Amino acid sequence: MKKFLSLILSIILIFTMAIPAFAADTVKQTCPTIYIHGFMGSKICEDKNDISTKYTFPSGDEILEPVKNELLPALLTYIATDNGEPFAYKLCEIVNGMFEGYFNNSDGTAKGNSGSYMPYPSAKSITATSNLEFIYDWRGDPFKIAADLNDFIDYVLEHSGAEKVALRCHSLGSVIGTTYLTVFGSSKVMGIVFDSAALLGVTYVGELLCGNPEFAGDALTRGFKDLLSENEYNELISGALDILEIAGITDDAGRFLNELIQKIAPILYKETLVPLFAHWPAAWAMTPDKYIDEGMEYIFNSYCTGEEYKVLKGKIEKYNKEVRATKYDTLRSFDENGRMAVIARYGYGALPVSPSWDVLTDTVVDTKHASLGAETATVGTSFGNEYLEGKDLSLISPDRTVDASTCLFPEKTWFIKNIKHDRTDITKPLHAELLFGEEEATVENYEALSRFMIFDAETEILSEDNSEYKEPVEENEKVSVFVKVMKFFTALFEFLTNLLKDKK
């Protein structure tokens, strides 16, 4: 009976901890909403008017086959000869073949008639409470995309009878939403939610455009752990990575990759990274302010040096002058008349491809940038007592890794721990509450929506993060190694046991 009562009590606690505003019927929608997806959020078609011509990203087998049959032999040749050129050209050949349909022209426009397929919904289907999605070519010029968004908003308003719309902007969508406000103003928009906003940029994008790729053993270990954190064999994989780290193999791998990348970087940039990535105006819009001048100098002085690149450079400079330089004023101005809310995620490191792999992210966008200015600790660390002295602790995350006090809108910014960049399905109900709740969306007005929340991927429950901070204990290195080894063998034993059960 005690066990039964404990179970019932646990279930009650779990459901009462979950954020109550996440029920679909808690708010009454008062105008149409338009979702603006992020980078790679729509399919690119060879003919943007024909969805059947869409390009798809290569499957695992399509990647593995050329890697096994072509790239691996080239890598072995490099190891034997110390000549990286054959490997570099083979890598570029494979990547370019896989992503040929995503390349832009040198002026930043789409090749041929390629683009995203965006049919408007029928006029009859649009109502004052419609939830619509704006599809756009994420490779393109933010100003062109904002103009297309304006046309779509006009169409929605005309056929819904509404006076305004609400915008839900995820990742790169925040760049598009802000560019729209800059050019067309806010008269047609009642509210905006930024979810994992890339408006302030992505650090590894900036570092790569500055010509600074880098690998490190710690970065590789952390990156793989974050990537596979929701995999059913997470414990086994994590344990195996710990064993490799203890043996020094990940450090050796980092040194090997760094040596290789330094030799082949000029070829990779010239043949693939620049013609693919740097020809996307949107990539430049996601470059943080601190890297934009250095990045443009590096790319346009080293690779994009011809007359044919003037148009692309002009588009980037126009964005820098009209949107980048005024973004804070634009958002403050909107906040005075409309509903503004920001959702940032944290708990992960960045992609392990640049020196700043240890910035706190949602696996893609820096938490500092997604929150429009929060201070964050680096991955694996927390704020010390000296930093916290005199701080309002209600603005500090329970794990002491996020300081919300420096955000552009500290009282309108919410943080979710352990939720990855692409999980928009989890935050969508929160968007509705922040846009259409009875009171203005602030942390004070919506006590049920805790400033700091936490996501449990196993149960799919989002709840208040009310955990207590524990001072880190200095580990005995020998004990730490022993614990990691035992965790690995425990996970391996469990895996083998389950495997045998399945076979029976």
Image (tube, rainbow, N blue to C red):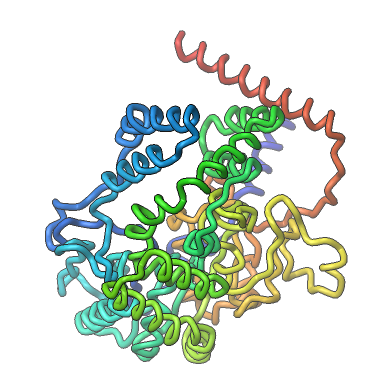
Give above or below for 445 relative to 184: above
Residue 156 shown left or right of residue 289 in the figure: left
| Residue 408, x across and y down, in percent | 61, 79
* Occupied quadrant, residue 122: bottom left
Left or right for 262, reference 155: right
Q: Position of residue 25 (x, y in %)?
A: 43, 65
Measuring 33% from the left and 65% from the top, which residue is drawn there? 279
The residue furthest top is: 504
152 left or right, relative to 379: left
Quadrant location of the N terminus in the rendered image: top right
Q: Residue at x 27, y 56 (%)?
A: 102
- Residue 215 vertical position relative to residue 325 in the rendered view, above or below: above
In-front residue for pair 320/395: 320
Near-viewer residue (25 or 164): 164
How many marks do you count on the picture? 0
- At which x and y percent is residue 473? 86, 44
Q: Which residue is drawn at 44% across and 58% down?
A: 424
In this orientation, which residue lies closer to the viewer: 459 or 57? 57
Q: Horizontal and vertical percent for residue 502?
A: 47, 15
